[in-house]
Amino acid sequence: MFDEATIDTYRDRISDAVDGARAELDEALADARQLVGRFHTLRPRAQQMVSLASDGGHSRIEVNPFNLFVVRVVDSNGNEIMSGVVAPHEDTRELSRQQFDAVGEPITAIGVLMRDLGVAKISELTPMIKDEPDSNGWVIVYRDLCEWAALYERLVYDTPTASTVYVKDGLLRTKIFRDDLLIQIGSRVNAAIEHWWQERRVRVSLAGVAKHSEIAEYYRLAFAVVGGLPPGYPLWTDIPLDVQRKVYTWPEYVREPDDVRPGIEDPKFNIGAMHFVRFGPGEGDRLWTVDVLHHQRHHFEEVVSALVADAQDGFPIAHYPLSLQRADEFAQVAGFDRELLTELMKDEIRSRLPEGRGFVLDAMQLDVDVTARRYG
């Protein structure tokens, strides 16, 4: 335990740090007071919802000496859109070839995205994946690419029969795509949405809801201190760009896709318009950060009203879109499915071990990692 002198030292250091950040807090409080007056009320509006979620890098197979990752993208109806098992050190050029059939036609959502964007390799989609990876981190990027590709395929190539809101787990801005590929994706999605509106008067929308965001955390204390958000119904407000810039120091993350100016690099990493939304009716209910397509920002209230309706039955997270929670639950490889994958892995490894040494796999599974039990 800390002794009294150590506690006094930490108290002084914390006090100095808080004093140093006081000006920043005062500015956040001023912003919150300004934003409180911008909030609008929301009424739930029932509409068809489709959410997509992915699981990759979290669903580890228990007996897994080769450190393989299961990557899945599943929608809120339990439909598996993409799935695969990838090895962190595999040549991703082979993974790229697996997205196409023998005559070069795409057989996965990633393949469709690559074809439409005119790239031949996954490494050409993103600078974060090399042809020959030297770390495990690329698997998480690949998972995110799969989720973006699944959304893209649905939005551009599905034939909608009713107005539908597609919901992404996370905001509609990312740095994973190379050059202006994200802007190209946004343009193609906008064109498809406009086509279905003109052809059938069917409104297809895209929103992104962040479980965690820097801007929501930054202003969380400020809103709590200021108060003033009335209880009784959900609320929303747009987040002005000058407020976003105070939190996100990298300007490309907040620049709008139509912000094209001479002498300045075109925007590349954002196709969304950012808002705060309170899905619940209570004064203390959490504010979430929500993007809609920048192209659809004038229809934000219509889009988010459907999210509010979906959030009314949110479980186990109250006042959070149920479709997102369902998609996330379906995407997880757990329970019997995880045990099945473990057994499949053991069978494959056992068939390649020297004769009479297959029992070591069962011994590995029974071995207790005491350090993991103690330290996590």
Image (tube, rainbow, N blue to C red):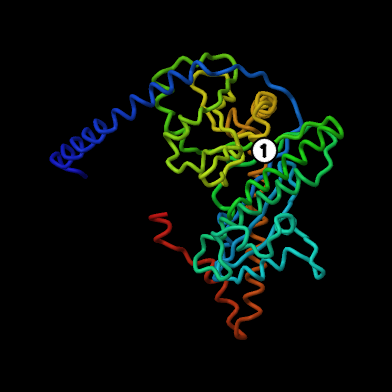
Q: Residue 347 placed where, x, y %?
A: 66, 72
The correct choice, above or below, for 206 with respect to 79 in the image is: above
Residue most extreme to the front: 262
Q: Where's residue 269, x and y in %?
A: 56, 46
Bin the neighbour count of mark 1 within 10 Å (Cα to Cα): few under 14, some 14-19, many 20 and up.
many
Q: Kindly give the residue lying farthest to the left in the view shown.
A: 5
The quadrant holding residue 190 is top right
Choose between 229 and 375: the one closer to the eye.
229
Rendering quarter of residue 27: top left
**Residue drawn at 18 percent across, 39 percent down:** 7
Residue picked out by circle 1: 167
- Amino acid at pointer 1: Val
Q: Position of residue 335 (x, y in %)?
A: 63, 53
230 relative position to 194: left or right: left
Front-most of residues 262 and 125: 262
Q: Looking at the picture, does residue 155 appear above or below residue 40? A: below
Residue 160 location, quadrant: top right
Look at the numbered disc 1 and give the secondary structure of its residue.
strand
Q: Position of residue 163 (x, y in %)?
A: 79, 31
